[in-house]
Each structure stands twice: as C-alpha cells, then as structure tokens.
Image (spheres, helix red, strand yellow):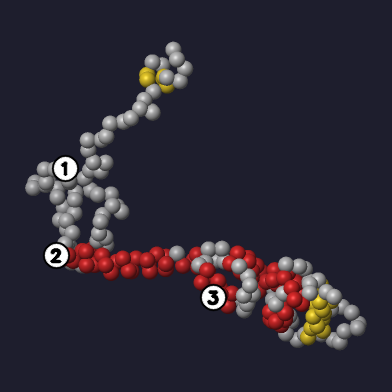
Amino acid sequence: METGRYSFGNEKDTSLSPQPESEHRPYWGEVPPGLQRYSTRLIHYLPEIYRPFREHTGVGAPMNGDFGRREHTFLSRFLAIFESILLPIEWTVDGFDLFLHARTTPKGFLYWLAGWFALTFDPGWDEARRRQFLVEASNIYARRGTKWALQRVLEVYTGVMPEIVDDTDELPPHTFIVRLPLRKQDVNVVLVEKLIESHKPAHTTWKLQWRD
C-alpha cells in the first residue's frame, strides 16, 4: 500500500480531487437573512395591505424550484432608499460606547474627548500619542490638583519625569518649582505652562526651570 494515497483503510482519499458542481442551488425555501436584494424592514411597520411582497409557496408556486422568493414592488424599493440612510445612523448610535474610549473613538472625536478633561493636544503629536494621552486622562483628572497628577501629565506630554520642589525654605509660601530636564526648544513652552496652570493646586504659584 502506498503511503499517503489512502485516508481510512482502503478508502481512497479524494479530498484533492475535483468535485462535481452541485446541480441545485445552495439555499432552498426561505431566503436566509441578509441575502435579500432589498431591505424590507420598514415595510413591516405599515398595515398588511402595503406589504410589497408575496410568498411563492404551496399551490401556484413556480416550477423552477425558486421557492420562498419574495417579489419586491416599487414601495419596498422606495423605502429601501431611506433605510439605507437611516441604518448607518442607527449603527452609529448602537455603537456609541466605542466613541467614549480613547482606543476606539474615531480620530475626529479625540479633541471632543480631550475637552472633557480640559486637555490640549500638541499640534505636532501623531494620532497614537493623542490616544495614549487620553488613556491617562481619567487617572490624571481624578487626582487633579495633586503633585502626582501634575508630574504625570507633564511626563506624558514631554516624555521625561519632571522634578517638583515644594518643600524648601527658599521659596515663598504656596510656591513650587517645576524642573524639566529639557531645553526650551525641545517642547512647546506655551503648552507646558498651560498644563501646569491647569493641574496645579488653585492656591499656589509656580516657577519653571529648564535644563541649561
């Protein structure tokens, strides 16, 4: 017996042999959902007299085996135009929870989500970095006004951990220093200052120091 020619005992393996084409259609009876040419969902909200199709079943059915075929009239095709407009809107509403997460929201909604947390994107950021910034936003916003939140938001934005000094006698009361190990030309200074102002304790003042 030749190895590989038989699958079970003496039964010949025909898995690679060409198969004859089927003599029948793959579906019989009622057309499976999703295969209709025209959508007729809206028509079901109208009285029965307006139903635009009739079932070919039983006595009088066509002799060509096309059982269950629905004949669509002008009304069903006309309503399908509006349904093609309304369905995408319904899909958007049904999936609106995806708009509320930084990983799945459309690109155009990133600024909208950022507005919830009073965040501003650097114009030079790519989409991936903006999404990562928003992923961190909920934790940062929950602890807004704390030292941790200020350090974290600056770290996410600049890519380096800032040093915040607020426990030295050399500073006036309620004043702290933010030291960034970067040069001014490395980042958007205006945006850094805005982030500090937005996430510092309300009663404090600050000074910003850069690397020489």
Residue flagged by tag 3: what amino acid is it? Trp
Pointer 1 or 3: first along the chain: 1
In the image, 46 versus 29, the foreground residue is 29
Q: Which residue is mark 1?
A: 65
**Residue at 68% over, 79% down:** 191
**Which amino acid type corresponds to the residue marked 1 in the rendered image?**
Gly
User: Image check: 186 left or right of 6?
Assistant: right
Q: Looking at this view, name the residue that lies furthest to the front.
A: 185
The disc labelled 2 sits on which kind of residue? Ile
Q: Circle 2 is placed at which residue position?
A: 49
Q: Residues within 10 Å of mark 3 (few under 14, many from 20)?
A: some
- Residue 208 lies left or right of residue 30; in this view the side is right
How far is mark 2 from mark 1, CA to CA? Answer: 27 Å
3 or 2: tag closer to the N-terminus: 2
Q: Which residue is at 83% across, 74% downward?
A: 211
* Other-residue count near label 2 (Cα within 10 Å), few / some / many at <14 / 14–19 / ≥20: few
Residue 45 shows up from this direction: no
Q: Report, in whole angstroms, how far the alpha carbon at label 1 lies from the one at label 3.
A: 56 Å
Which circle marks residue 112 in the picture? 3
Mark 2 or 1: in front is: 1
Q: Quadrant of residue 122?
A: bottom right
Residue 141, above or below 40: below
Q: Earlier in the sequence, mark 2 or mark 1?
A: 2
Q: Does residue 103 appear in this view? A: yes
| Image quarter of residue 86 | bottom left
Q: Position of residue 29 (x, y in %)?
A: 21, 45
The numbered disc on residue 163 is none
Question: At 50% across and 67% down in the image, what residue appears?
Answer: 106
Q: How many marks?
A: 3
How far apart are labels 3 and 2 at the CA level?
47 Å
* Above-or-below relation of 113 to 71: below
Badge 3 vs badge 2, beta-carbon distance below 8 Å? no
